[in-house]
Image (tube, coloured by chain):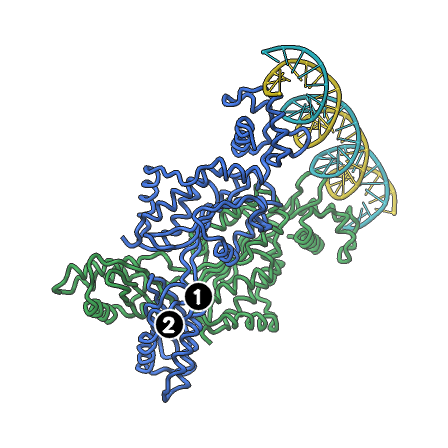
Chain colours: A green, B blue, C yellow, D cyan
Amino acid sequence: MLTERQLLILRAIIDDYIQTAQPVGSRTLSKRDDLSFSSATIRNDMADLEDLGLIEKPHTSAGRIPSEVGYRYYVDHLVEKRVIDERETHHLGERLRASAQESDLLIRQAADLLSDLTNYTTVALGPNSQMNRLARIDLMPLDERRGVVLILTDQGHVEHRTVVFESPMAPDMIEEMIRFLNDRLKGTPIGQLKSRLSEEVSTLQLANREQYEHMLQLIQSTAGLQHPTSLYLGGKKNIFNQPEFQTLDTLRPFLEWIDEQERLTDWLESLPNREIYVSIGSENGILALQNCSVITSDYTLDGKTFGTIAMIGPTRMDYRHGVQMMGQLIEALRRTKLEE
Amino acid sequence: MLTERQLLILRAIIDDYIQTAQPVGSRTLSKRDDLSFSSATIRNDMADLEDLGLIEKPHTSAGRIPSEVGYRYYVDHLVEKRVIDERETHHLGERLRASAQESDLLIRQAADLLSDLTNYTTVALGPNSQMNRLARIDLMPLDERRGVVLILTDQGHVEHRTVVFESPMAPDMIEEMIRFLNDRLKGTPIGQLKSRLSEEVSTLQLANREQYEHMLQLIQSTAGLQHPTSLYLGGKKNIFNQPEFQTLDTLRPFLEWIDEQERLTDWLESLPNREIYVSIGSENGILALQNCSVITSDYTLDGKTFGTIAMIGPTRMDYRHGVQMMGQLIEALRRTKLEE
DNA sequence: GATTAGCACTCAGTAAATATGAGTGCTAAT
DNA sequence: ATTAGCACTCATATTTACTGAGTGCTAATC
C-alpha cells in the first residue's frame, strides 16, 4: 500500500512527465509547492515506487518516468471518470447540433471536435448498418442496358450500385419484381438481406424465371457490398506534434497503421463494449501502437446505441483530460437528437 | 547547343542520380562502359554543363546533381513519350477489367495499379459529375417525418441525403411533386440543378405552396452537396521509401498536404488539360511539393473524357519509367469499356 | 586543338577525446 | 524519519583531428 506522500510523488511525476515528456528528477519535484520535502526524501520514496514497478528510469543518471503499471495505477485511482461540466457539455452539444441533420456528418463532427479538444488523433465509427432494417429497395433504369440498385434502410442509410443487364429489361417487369421484393422484405435486417433474397425468389414460379434470376443476382451483389460502416479520422496531423513521434521509426508504423481503414474498422468493432475504456501502451496488443494509449467509448445518439469513438495518443497522454473530454462528448452525443 | 558527349554525360548523370540519389562524380562516370573518356575530360564537360545551368553541385567537393533545368531538358529531349508496349498495355487492361463494373472501383484500381508499377504515390480523380445530366430525382419517405432525397445521373452517379420534414407530408403530394420535377428537369446538368429547381417551382401555382417550398428547399440542399467527384489515393506508403523524405521537415508537409482531399481535388481540376504533362520540382508552385515532380494526365474511358490521374514522386523521379507507365495506363483505360 | 595525367585544395562526414551537468544512491548527521 | 553531503554514472554537447571523394587547374601527350 502506498503512503500518502508516495501517492503525491507518483502523481506529481506522472503529471509532470505528461506535460514535459522529460524524465522527472527529485530536485525538480522538491521545488514544487505541493511537495515541500527535501530531494533526498523524495529520492527514497522514488526508490520505493520503482521497487513496486510504478516508475522506472531510462538510465542511471536520469530522472524517473512512469511505467505502464504506473499509468494504470494513475488511471484507475487518480483519474475521476464521468465528471460532467454542464456548461462545457452544453457547449459541445451546440457544436454538434449544427451537424445533426445527417449521421455521417455528425460522426465526422464528433471526431473533429474530440481531436480539437485534446490534440490527439481520433477515430469515430458509425453505426453498423448490418443491424438496420430494409426500408425500401429499388432498381431504377438508366438506359436499356443499365440501372441503379438502391437499398434504403430505416435509419436513412443508402447503398447503391450501378448494374448492367445481360439483356434489355422490360420496365414493367422490373417494376413488378421490385414491388414483390419490397412487399416481402421490408424490415429485414441488412445483414440477412442477401440470403433472404434467395429464399424469397426461390418460392416464385414465374414465366421469365431466367431473367429474374439474373436481376436478382445484380441486386444481391449490391446487398453484399462491404460498406457496412462509416469511419472518420479526426486530427491526424496532431501526431506530428508529439515528441515521441519525431522519428520515422515511430511515426511510420503509426501512420501506416492508421491509414488502413479496413483494419481500423475491424479493430474498433472488436473492442470491448464499454462506456469509457482506457488501454495503456502495449495493452492494446498492436505492434504499431505499442507506444500509444487509447481511450475508447461506445456512444449513443438520442438514446440508441450508435457507434464507437476512440482517441489515440502517446502512452504519455493526458489521461485525465482525455477521459473527461471523452465523457463530455459522449454525454453531449447522448443528448443530441438526430434529424432536428 | 550541347555536344554529343555532353549529352551523353548529362544523361548519365541524371540516370545515375535517379537510381542512387547520390551526387555523381567524374570518376564514377568514366568507369561506365558507355563513357570511355578520362575523368578529366568528363570534368571539363561537367563544368560546361554547370555553366549552362543543367547540373549543379551541392558543395565544392561533391559530385554533380541535375538541376531542375537539367531535368526539364532530360524530360523534353531524352524521354520518349507514348511508347506503347502492346503486351504490357494488354496486361494492364486485363487487370483493369476485373474492376470495370463500377467507375469508382475502376478509378481506385487505376490509382493502385499505377503506384504498384512505379512505387510512387498516385492520385486519381473521377469524372466531375457537375457535367452529368439528371436521370431521375426521387424522394422516398422513411417514416412520417423523414425521407431520403435521391439524385441519379445518366452516368450512374448517385447523390443522396436524409431530410427531415417540418410537418408530415402526404405521400401523394410528394409523388405529384416528384413526377413534376422529373418531367421538367430530366437531362439538366447537375451543376445547374439547384438554380433550375427554383425556376421551375416559381412557375407553379399551387394550393399548398408553402409545403412545396419547404420540400424544394430540402431537395435543393441535396443538389448543392459537395460530392461532385471521387478521388482516390494509391500507394501513399511509397513516400516513406524515398530517401529525400526521411526527415520530418520534408515528410510532414507532404503528408499533411496529400491528406487534404478537398485541396487535392481543386488542384487536380486546375491542371492544364493534356495527355501527359510533367511538372518538375518547384514548377508546380506548391510549397509542400517543392521537392516533388508530378506526372499528370487526363484519361478517357471507353472513348469519353473521364478524369485526371497524377503520379507524385521526388524531383529525382524516374521520369522515363513514370511517363511510360502513365502512357500505358491511360492507353489501357482508353481501351477499357465500363460496364462489361 | 582535343584529351589526359597529375597535383594541390576543399569540405562533408565520421570518429575519437573531452567536458558538462542533471540526477542518483548511500552514509552520516540532525 | 528526514535531510545534507558527496562520490559516482552516463547521456549529451563540444572540440578536434582525420578521411576520402571530388574538384579545378596546369602541363604533358596524342
- Horizontally, residue B89 falls left or right of residue A247, namely left
Q: Are marks 2 and 1 on the same chain?
A: no
- From the top left corner, tell me how far across and down residue B52 is, in percent: 62, 35
At label 2, which amino acid type do we have?
A: Val
Q: Crowding near pointer 2: few (<14 within 10 Å), some, many (20+)?
A: many
- From the top left corner, tell me how far across and down residue B65 is, in percent: 59, 34
Chain containing mark 2: B
- From the top left corner, tell me how far across and down residue B183 is, in percent: 31, 75
Q: Nearer the viewer, mark 2 or mark 1?
A: 2
Residue nearest the viewer, comparing A327 with A94 = A94
- Horizontally, residue B29 falls left or right of residue A271, namely right
Rendered image: mark on residue B139:
none
Chain containing mark 1: A
Residue nearest the viewer, comparing B55 with D13 = B55
Which secondary structure, mark 1?
strand
Which secondary structure, mark 2?
strand
- From the top left corner, tell me how far across and down residue A50 is, in percent: 66, 45
Q: Residue at x 23, y 63 (%)?
A: A144
Q: Residue at x 57, y 44 (%)?
A: B281
Q: Residue at x 52, y 72 (%)?
A: A98
Look at the numbered discs 2 and 1 and tell me whether their residues touch, using CB distance below 8 Å.
no
For residue A166, what is the image quadrant? bottom left
**Quarter holding the N terminus of chain B?**
top right
Rendered image: mark on residue A306:
1
Is residue B117 something one can see in this rendering?
A: no
Q: Please name the residue that numbered disc 2 is placed on.
A: B148
For residue A169, what is the image quadrant? bottom left
At label 1, which amino acid type do we have?
A: Phe
Alpha-carbon span between mark 2 and mark 1: 20 Å
Residue nearest the viewer, comparing B73 with B146 = B73
Image position of B144 with respect to A299: above or below:
below
Q: Crowding near pointer 1: few (<14 within 10 Å), some, many (20+)?
A: many
